[in-house]
């Protein structure tokens, strides 16, 4: 919610969300309810790209190898007004920053390791008037986030890919470790048997 408010999405903007994990899918839900002209979402995991399409992205693309990346570059050569990185990886930040069109905005929302570094060109940022925005989760947005879920704007049914009871905590953790790419968000629900 804080990131969305800081981003100030303008009507008619084209938006690229980099990453379709749980955070990227939350952004998908928020952006699709804005007055954007288009929402494209990318990921390196095919199952996540399919979920992104199912919950609202106008276009989804599988990236991650040179051929797929080259195809993406050709298809979207003009870039995007807004690019939101949800990967939490330095490579994702670098990749996404290169997709912002002149005058656009780039949001770093995924949490990278504290020692991650990305090389940028201050001249290119200046020349192209690209704004870089960051956001974290401040405590004053929780009420708004709950209301978004209650209203159905945030579709948690599509994002939570597995629910487990308290007796299944160990198997849930093991599944998360072994199937991290196919599982988006796993939840421990104490009301389940």
Image: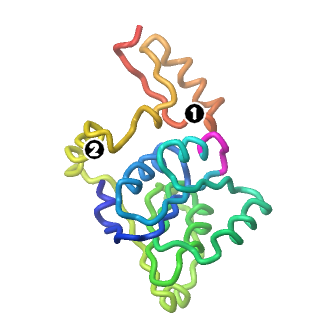
Residue 131 in the image, given as x and y percentages of width and height: 42, 78
Instruction: Give the left or right position of residue 52, taking residue 26 as reference.
Output: right
Residue positioned 62% across, 52% down in the render: 43
User: Which numbered disc covers residue 148?
Assistant: 2
Q: Quadrant of residue 121?
A: bottom right
Task: State the residue lying farthest toward the right.
Answer: 67
Quarter the N terminus occupies:
bottom left
Q: Which residues are magenta?
A: 44-48
User: Which numbered disc covers residue 183?
Assistant: 1
The answer to whether one can see residue 88 in this image is: no
* Vertical position of residue 101 compared to residue 31: above or below: below
Residue positioned 60% across, 43% down in the render: 50
Is the residue under label 1 in contact with that under label 2 (CB below 8 Å)?
no
Mark 2 residue element: helix
Task: State the residue lying farthest toward the top.
Answer: 193
Residue 49 in the image, given as x and y percentages of width and height: 60, 46
User: Which color scheme did the rendering employ for the protein?
Assistant: rainbow
Separation of residues labelled 2 and 1 (CA atoms) = 23 Å
Number of the front mark, 2 or 1: 2
The answer to whether one can see residue 129 in this image is: yes
Instruction: Give the left or right position of residue 144, taking residue 71 as reference.
Output: left
Q: Main secondary structure of the magenta part?
A: helix
Quarter the C terminus occupies:
top left
Residue 136 in the image, given as x and y percentages of width and height: 35, 57
User: In this view of the protein, which residue sits in the foreground, 23 or 119?
Assistant: 23
Residue 29 in the image, given as x and y percentages of width and height: 40, 48
User: Per the image, is 70 magenta?
Assistant: no
Instruction: Give the left or right position of residue 129, taking residue 138 as reference.
Output: right
* Vertical position of residue 179 compared to residue 45: above or below: above
Q: Earlier in the sequence, mark 2 or mark 1?
A: 2
């Amino acid at each position: 919610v804080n990131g969305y408010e800081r981003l100030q999405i303008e009507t008619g903007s084209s938006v690229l969300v980099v990453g379709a994990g749980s955070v990227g899918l939350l952004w998908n839900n928020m952006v699709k309810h804005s007055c954007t002209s288009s929402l494209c979402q990318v990921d390196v995991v095919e199952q996540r790209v399919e979920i992104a399409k199912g919950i609202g992205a106008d276009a989804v693309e599988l990236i991650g190898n040179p051929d797929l990346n080259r195809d993406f570059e050709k298809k979207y050569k003009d870039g995007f007004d807004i690019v939101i990185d949800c990967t939490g990886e330095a490579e994702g930040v670098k990749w996404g920053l290169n997709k912002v069109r002149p005058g656009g905005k780039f949001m770093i929302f995924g949490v990278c390791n504290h020692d991650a570094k990305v090389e940028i060109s201050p001249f290119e940022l200046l020349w192209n008037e690209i704004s870089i925005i960051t956001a974290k989760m401040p405590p004053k947005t929780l009420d708004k986030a709950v209301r978004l879920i209650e209203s159905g704007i945030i579709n948690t049914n599509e994002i939570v890919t597995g629910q487990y009871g308290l007796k299944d905590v160990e198997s849930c953790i093991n599944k998360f470790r072994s199937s991290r790419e196919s599982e988006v968000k796993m939840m421990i629900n104490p009301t389940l048997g």
